[in-house]
Amino acid sequence: MLKNYFKIALRNLFRHKVYSFINILGLVIGMACAVLILLWVQDEVSYDNFHEKSNSICKLYVKFNMEGKTINSERTFSAVANDLKDRYPEIKSSSRIYEVKDCILKAIGSDNQNGNTVFAEKKGMAADPSFLQIFSFPLLKGNPQIALKNQNSIVITEEMAKKYFGDQDAIGKTMTINNRYDVTVTGILKNIPFNSHIRFDFLVPLKLLENFGINLNDYNTTSFITYLLLNDAASVQELNNKIQREFDKTIPVKEIKFQHSIVTLPRVHLFGDELFPRIIFVYALAGLAILILLIACINFINLSTARSMVRSKEIGVRKVVGAKRQQLITQFLCDSILISIVAMVIALIIVQFLLPSFNQITEKHLTFQLLNLQFILGLLGIVGIIGILAGSYPALYLSGLDPINILRGSASALKIKHRGSNKALLRKILVVTQFTFTIILIVNILNGFRWNKHMSQLGFDKDNVICIRTNGGINNNYPVFKNELLKNQGIEMVSTSSQLPLAMTVSGSTNWGLKNEASKILAMNADVGYDYARMFKLKMVQGRYFSEEYPSDENGSIIINEKAVKLLGVKDPVGRRFYFQGQEYTIIGVIQDFHSLPKILEIPPNVFLLNPQRFEYIFVRLKADVNNRPVENVTQTIEDIKKTYKKFNVDNPFEYFFLNEYKFEEGKIFDTVEKILICFTVLGIFIAALGLFGLSSFMIELRTKEIGIRKSLGASFTKILTLLSKDYLKLIIIANAIAWPLSFMIEDSMSNLYFYKIDFAYWLFIAAASFVLLIALAAVGMQSVRAARTNPVESLRYE
């Protein structure tokens, strides 16, 4: 029997090819979007689950309050890990991590066929020996118990071993760090899984940091990331309470109150960072997937309910010959489930082709796992829910009709009755819902563009600026190097800094101000070179910038920003004494505020010192024309810079990037989510337009004879077009009334993530309403024009 149901369903599918195509196309796009988003969501929630002890591993965070501002950080004091382990028996083991972001590694005695054994590495870590016992990062070679015990050892990934040593066995080989420290390879790690929030290419023992003068057991600097391994019976909540109630009170730092807390490893990726909580984006994209599926479902339901009336005589005949209501319901459900299955199969094929591009957009490595039981059950659930939702209403409605009334009444009578029935009311509700979703999507995407533009305005000019990582070795020769660069016709100016202007960090959090005493206000500072202000077109509000005409600037002068002046509480700071990190300076200038941190945060007080010999970055501004385009060939200019760089820095690789392309590691999620939202919002709008086109086409087809009669009685083209469109205009008005307050609530809640907000633009509502109106008129109008221009004679012959 079930086989016959599907045969009939296939016949109906091919009998109404246009409506079947519209139904399937809408579902295919909706399902493909949903599957791609759900793959992304599944990857996000799977982070760090591969560790065998993931539920017992906790990451330590610290909160501290400075001048009424609460700051949450993953970086703690170096002494905290051991003190916690000694005090609380619930803690089985602990490990600290110190990130080694920029260093030069060189392989000694390698016969790598590539010929290059020196690289600049950005993803390194120094860790306690217990690190490899706490986490499940498997060693392909070496013993995890002793791999990090020797101070001069290094553990590298298999990818890194291949890069430096080729096909040689790297175990026992020697490598040099920054041309100063020799280390021996004691272990080769399997490449780190992509769904790990801890990512590194090499590990060195934490004791190696003592060579750099870093104290591994003090309460002076917060530079260490700490992980704790708890006993199986330990309670995270109880330990949290103990730490905050007992341990924090004993920290020997009296100026600032610290509050430590622990977060279990599976929650770190989604909940750990309070500034960029990824769980918000997971919820947002999961909601988008559901929204797109709902829009596709509404299309499906609308067309299914509209088309079901043409099958009324079929139902009447089948009832007369003995078909039971349960059988008729099964038939309708088989129809809709078959369409869902066909749509899902096509959607999966499309997903397979789109996955590489989607991975490129999201910077992930998602895979399509059809053999995964959870994935299969999820797909079957989507197919079943959509099929049942779309088929249940027409099945229940038509199967309950009296066969005598069906066969006695005319088709037209049924259609007229249908237009005034609850079925038509349901269809109108669904259309309003679809319009509402579409308006919300349009408002959100337009507001997203406004936020993107707002976030890109940082208060300084980052265009046409090439940033070179020095990696050491060029600082002493910088004046000669700079003069060599300025001979290039494509270069306008050169300057230096110890930090990037849009990613400054805290170098001194205390001991700054007009008095020689500790301050509890965080301050960002950078050592900069001459022309730094001109390089980024920063405006001097008061005073002057550093100048070679004033030799004293290098030792006794300082520049601060407007925010620092505001916190100092003075109107004329220029010429005043300024104490910073125990030294006395004279304020020579006040620079206009710019965003030295992600714009999601408040602009901090910034302090600039002149130090042309101490820098990590060299900035090169390219000469540009009136349209802000480089006047010389950029590729050739970069090649010339590289040649000049290698003259002064032979041993180190040349690394550069354009400053306007720089992205914060934590903030990349914003760009990723924005790209996904734009792509899938456009597709969601297309699905809504497609469904409206199919529905209006079918409904106008049912009114063909009515249109013919009206034309024969003298109705004009405009009147007929108005007649056919006015119902949809009413629905759009209702949809706007619902969508506008919902859109405002969504945008208001999202804006709370940002410190610097923008006013909500009410023109967005008008733009969204106009766009939806345009979609509706286009979809309905195309069919209305065709119907209105049909010869009345042909229309009256209809049926």
Image (cartoon, rainbow, N blue to C red):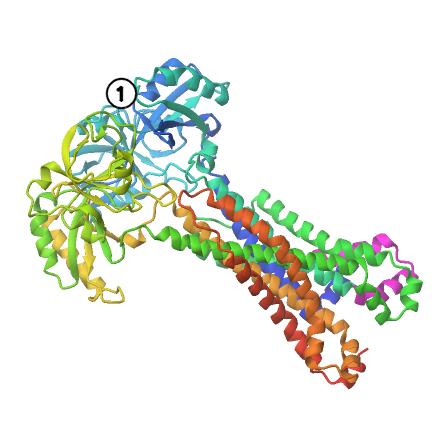
Helix, strand, or loop for circle 1? loop
Residue 617: give x, y in percent of width and height. 20, 46
Between residues 39 and 410, which one lies in front from this camera angle? 410
Judge left or right: residue 346 versus residue 260: right
Q: For the N terminus, which image quadrant?
A: bottom right
Depicted 215 relative to depicted 452: above or below: above
Between residues 364 and 409, which one lies in front from this camera angle? 409
Asked where in the image residue 141 lies, by quadrant, the reply is top left
Residue type at the position of mark 1: Asn
Residue 522: give x, y in percent of width and height. 29, 33
**Could you tell me what secondary structure mostly forms the magenta stretch?**
helix
Residue hosting label 1:
217
Depicted 271 relative to depicted 489: above or below: above
Between residues 569 and 353, which one lies in front from this camera angle? 569
Q: For the C terminus, which image quadrant?
A: bottom right
Residue 550: give x, y in percent of width and height. 7, 44
At horizontal 45% and vertical 52% (from top left) the residue drawn is 674
Q: Residues within 10 Å of mark 1 (few under 14, many from 20)?
A: few
Residues in magenta?
309-337
Seen as rendered, the residue at the extreme front is: 571
Residue 143 seen in the current view: no
Marks counted in the figure total 1
Q: Is residue 26 magenta?
A: no
Between residues 331 and 617, which one lies in front from this camera angle? 617
